[in-house]
Image (cartoon, grey):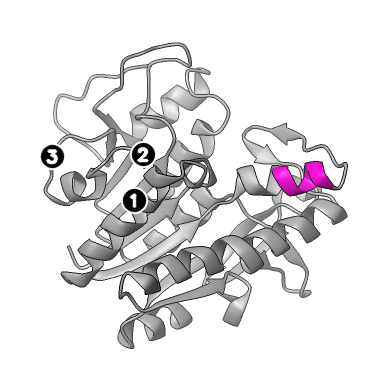
Amino acid sequence: MDKIVIKYGGSVQKGGSAADGFLDELASLAHTGGSWAVVHGGGAEISEWLKRVGHTSEFKNGQRITDDLTLAVVEMVLCGRVGKRIARHLAACGVRAASVSGEDDRMLVARPLDRGEYGHVGEIETVNTGLLTALWEQGYVPVVAPLGVGADGRVYNINADVAAGQIAGALGADLLVLATDVTGVKESADSATVIPELTVAEAMAMIRTGCAVGGMIPKLTSAAVAIAGGVRTVVIASGEEPGLLARVMQGQSAGTRIVGNREGSVHHA
């Protein structure tokens, strides 16, 4: 595979040695070739810093409602802390990495989501890939903070899963891996069984019927957007599992694989 986009979730980053192991594996695979990009979250650390300043987060449909103070903390944490930390770790593994934001070079052009119902949360109108491809050409792994900029210059907080899906589609990536703290997509929130494969139609049906809730909604939506943009395969899996990326790259079973279509598909929802 030539182009791989990884969404490195904030929930995985809490995992200590597991999180370090994920980045170590990513770096090892990046040394073997291909063009890699990381889109990172940072939700847990954002919530921690908001708590420090006495501010409570509210969520709706898996999205953090973002007021002025929340936006300031989001930008500080994602651009000033998380992205730099990931880039430093990759650099320590011998990988050239550059921490950038979707604001840079107007990479992610956004508008208010649902007419501002979520505050400063944006939905992406356009992905400009020039900065990403320029970094790839120079041998860098871009590490992207999911912030966008509006036509008026305003900054928007963008769900990292959604940003990863749209970036992967715009880049024509071969693979998108959404690394999270769950083992994959399940029949319901209280189910113990991971669904090994879903078509986009099945994934969207899970959202419509309420089988997918909370943070799984933007993940499934991201997968659908990525595949519509030309990405061949999306995998939703636990970034805490050792060897996850190698298994995915080798086509082995890992988490839930999202595909466009398959013959004789069976709906799970």
Cα separation, mark 1 vs mark 3, equals 17 Å
Question: Residue 24 location in percent, x, y?
Answer: 31, 58
Disc on the earlier residue, 2 or 3: 2
Q: Can residue 51 be found in the magenta stretch?
A: yes
Disc on the earlier residue, 1 or 3: 1
Q: Which mark is residue 252?
A: 3
The range drawn in magenta is 48-52
Q: Can residue 203 be found in the magenta stretch?
A: no
Q: Amino acid at mark 2?
A: Glu
Looking at the rendered image, the disc whose residue lies closer to the viewer, 2 or 3, is: 2
Q: Which mark is residue 22?
A: 1
Q: Amino acid at mark 1?
A: Phe
Q: Are marks 1 and 3 in contact (CB under 8 Å)?
A: no
Establish if 187 lies above or below 236: above
Q: Is residue 185 visible?
A: yes
Question: Residue 220 location in percent, x, y?
Answer: 44, 37
Disc on the earlier residue, 1 or 2: 1
Badge 3 marks a residue whose secondary structure is: loop
Q: Is residue 117 visible?
A: no
Establish if 194 lies above or below 230: above
Circle 2 residue: 240
Q: Nearer the viewer, residue 178 or 121?
A: 178
Write the residue at 31% across / 67% down: 36
Q: Are marks 1 and 2 in contact (CB under 8 Å)?
A: yes
Q: Are marks 2 and 3 in contact (CB under 8 Å)?
A: no
Badge 1 marks a residue whose secondary structure is: helix
Cα separation, mark 1 vs mark 2, equals 7 Å
Question: Residue 202 location in percent, x, y?
Answer: 35, 27
Write the residue at 42% across / 66% down: 89
